[in-house]
Amino acid sequence: MRRFPFIICTLAIIASCSEKGDEPVPPTPPEPQPSSGYYQAAVSDNGFASEDLKITRDFASGDRIGVFAVKEGAVLDSIDNLCVTLGDNGWETADGTMLTADSDITYYAYWPYTESLPSDIHPEGIDDYSFFSDVIDKWEVPSSQENAGTFEAADLMTACGTANGDTLSFAMNHQMFLVITELPHKRYIFTNENGLPDWNVPATDITFEGFGPYRHEDGTYRYIVNPMSPAMTLSGTYGEGEEMQSWEYRTEAVAGGLYYNKIGSGAETVEHNLQVGDYFLADGSLLPKDADPSLISSSDVIGIVFQLDQSRIGEAEKEALGGNVHALVMATKTVQNDNYFAWYNNNGVYSRDETEIGMVSTYDDDPYKAFELSDADINGYAKTKALREQRTEDYEAGYYEAFKAAADFRNEVGGPSESLNTTGWYMPSCGQAFDILRNLGGVTLNDSDGFIGSNLASFYWDGIGPVVTNLNQAMSNVSDENKNDFKNSGYYWTSSYCLDDEARYYGVIDIGSNVMCVSTYKRDILHVRSILAF
């Protein structure tokens, strides 16, 4: 049976919610009245709860709730599914509509906001459940909730406003039920001094029968169920061959409840000091850079950690991973085994202005300034994202050949797993490529030691060390089938825009001009070595 919220809303001197009980309720002192005549909204989450666990969400900038105002049994036209958004100055409306402090008004709210609710509300309702009862009954909960946005949209919270002075508080009650499934997996607890978040690597060959849960950053799988729907059985398998295990759970859903479904041993914790040079495996596991060579060569290595400095990781990478960024990883193989790709070429046309979609030019007549612009460009993921979202047809058609090849690299190496919280592969920007050469190639790359300016916004470093040898030494214990060595006089694209018809590549050589950064025609065909963030 459905568990009804134990909260009832009444029309009191101010719109408020009071608890229902058998004993007489003593009179309460009058609440302070708003000095402005209007309320400022405050929103909190009462959480999903079981006997020993409670999970709440923190509302973030951009979150939206829908608000209704009821007076004398009717919804006010001015506050009828009014969208209220959390911004820098609190919860605000786009058109400036205020929540009037009227003792005859009762306010109701729900989250997440939608322009069109699936059913009618009931102004005669006496609490948030009865007000939204038909909405709750018809609330769409898709069977596939793998995407974070889809998972959040499946949830539904409702509240009746409680006034106190200038504040109208909406303590949200979850009207859905949450199932959390924890399968056996590996959890890396990093011992680094800068407090990196944990890293969860899922079990192999996970399947879910007829439903798709959202994989949370803590390694668990979360799934929303509408208690008004018929009871259902959630089931799945993990492992392979003779080690394959199956599980199932039959839902007994109640509004605001949760069930923590721990399968087998749950999480195996591994303490690890994450370092530049550590090996990243196809399933997301990590090996220390000083691990036994035979273990490294026998493992499915697909990348090497090259950057831990959070200040040198792009904002788009951080946003894509919800702020939980650990490091950047360089692929141990080049795309399509040293194949060649154009940066942009549309049937012979290779001049195009990518600043229109947010790319920043790294061109300057002064080579020192050109270096500063290039080194500051640590936004490789943002460029690929911009092309995918704003030039989708051209990207899918292969006109941005190097970018698409870099992103499709997973099809070649079989990793990382799509269930991992990574950006996926993409082409590094100039600054990210420089960090590979610095941190794995053992060169400084500043604007003094060995720096030589050239024309056409290009520059070089001369006599600074055997960068190719050092790069290949970092991969020396990786099996031959899992790596492509850097080539002497090898030229590799970056995602950095320079001019409408030019972009930047980097070249490496052990003797003479050890590193070069050149602006060249986008139609030229060069190698690509992908990176990712996790």
Image: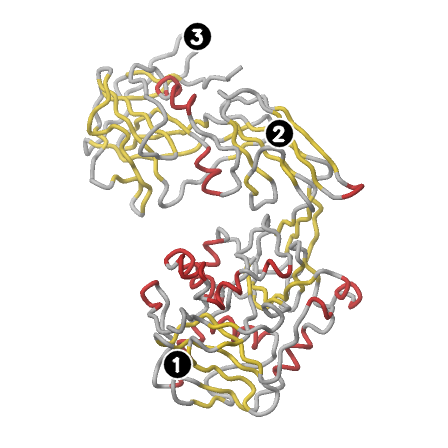
Left/right placement of residue 390 relative to residue 281 reads: left
Q: Which mark is residue 292?
A: none
Q: Which residue lies under the disc numbered 3?
A: 23
Q: Residues within 10 Å of mark 1 (few under 14, many from 20)?
A: many
- Residue 438's x, y, as percent? 56, 77
Residue 519: horizontal and vertical position, in percent? Answer: 42, 81
Residue that mark 1 sits on: 370
Q: Tell me the mark number nearer the camera, choosing from 1 and 2.
A: 2
Amino acid under label 2?
Answer: Leu
Q: Which residue is mark 2?
A: 234
Question: Label 1 vs label 2: CA separation?
Answer: 57 Å
Q: CA distance from mark 2 to mark 3?
A: 42 Å
| Marks 2 & 3, CB-CB < 8 Å contact | no
Residue flagged by tag 1: what amino acid is it?
Ala
Secondary structure of the residue carrying numbered label 1: helix
Quadrant of the image occupied by residue 307: bottom right
> Which tag is nearer the camera, tag 2 or tag 3?
2
Looking at the picture, which amino acid does disc 3 mark?
Glu
The residue depicted at 61 percent of the width and 87 percent of the height is: 510
Task: Categorize mark 3 by other alpha carbons within 10 Å: few (<14), some (14-19), many (20+).
Answer: few
Q: Measuring from the top left, give residue 322's x and y in whole percent.
A: 48, 51
- Picture quadrant of residue 512: bottom right
Which residue does the image show at 37% across and 41% down from the upper left?
63
Of residue 35 and residue 130, the one placed in the foreground of this image is 130
Instruction: Name the secondary structure under disc 3.
Output: loop
- Do callouts 1 and 2 mark residues in contact (Cβ within 8 Å)? no
Q: Earlier in the sequence, mark 1 or mark 3?
A: 3
- Pick the quarter of the image with the C terminus: bottom right
Q: Is residue 49 above or below residue 88?
A: above
Pointer 1 or 2: first along the chain: 2
